[in-house]
Image: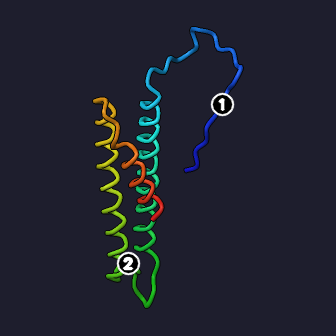
Amino acid sequence: RPTAEVRADAVSVPAHRAVPIADPGLVRDLAAVLLAADACGTAARSLDTAVAHAAVREQFGRPIGAFQAVKHLCADMLVRLEQARALTWDAARAVDEGAGAEAAEAEAAADEAAGS
């Protein structure tokens, strides 16, 4: 999904509403994990939709899900989704433990799974 940077220069925020950010890198890593989790959800929904369509769409008198090539496509989608999920969980754990380098990798894998 597209993201954006929001700037609020010269905006007055009451002290009780301000959220102190000690580590901007942590914010970046958390955002990457959240985007990866969102992309995993998108990929899972896409896979469910593809499998359901393959079960009802017929070609040559039988469901297209019966064709090996379609089965392989769905299996490849599932593998990419599960890899992205595992990376996302690992990235969330790493961020929780204070080492968020895996977050960007998880985001990239999940984006790829969602786009395939």
- Mark with earlier residue (1, 2): 1
Circles 1 and 2, Cβ within 8 Å, touching? The answer is no
Indicate left or right for 51 with 93 as reference: right
Name of the residue lying farthest toward the top? 15
Q: Quick one: 1 or 95, which is closer to the camera?
A: 95
Q: Nearer the viewer, residue 67 or 9?
A: 9
State the separation of the CA atoms marked 1 and 2: 46 Å
Q: Total number of numbered labels?
A: 2
Query: Vertical placement of 25 versus 38: above or below?
Result: above
Element under disc 2: helix
Graded by Cα atoms within 10 Å as few (under 14), some (14 to 19) or many (20 or more), the crowding at tag 1 reads few
Q: Is residue 18 rendered to the left or right of residue 55? A: right
> Residue at (31%, 29%) from the top-left corner?
98
Q: Position of residue 97 (x, y in %)?
A: 28, 30
The residue drawn where x is 42% and y is 35% is: 30
Q: Which mark is residue 28?
A: none
Percent across and percent down for residue 77 are 37, 65
Q: Is 41 or 24 nearer to us in this picture?
A: 24
- Residue extending furthest bottom? 60
Question: Coloring scheme of the render?
Answer: rainbow
Badge 2: residue crowd in 10 Å (few <14, some 14–19, many ≥20)? some
Q: Residue at x 40, y 80 (%)?
A: 63
Residue at image mark 2: 70
Residue type indicated by callout 2: Val
Kind of residue at badge 1:
Arg
> Residue 76 sits in which quadrant?
bottom left
Q: Does 96 appear above or below 106?
A: above
- Mark 1 or 2, closer to the camera: 1
At horizontal 45% and vertical 55% (from top left) the residue drawn is 111
In the image, residue 111 sits, relative to residue 75, either above or below, namely: above
Q: Which residue position is annotated with label 1?
A: 7
Q: Which image quadrant: the C terminus?
A: bottom left
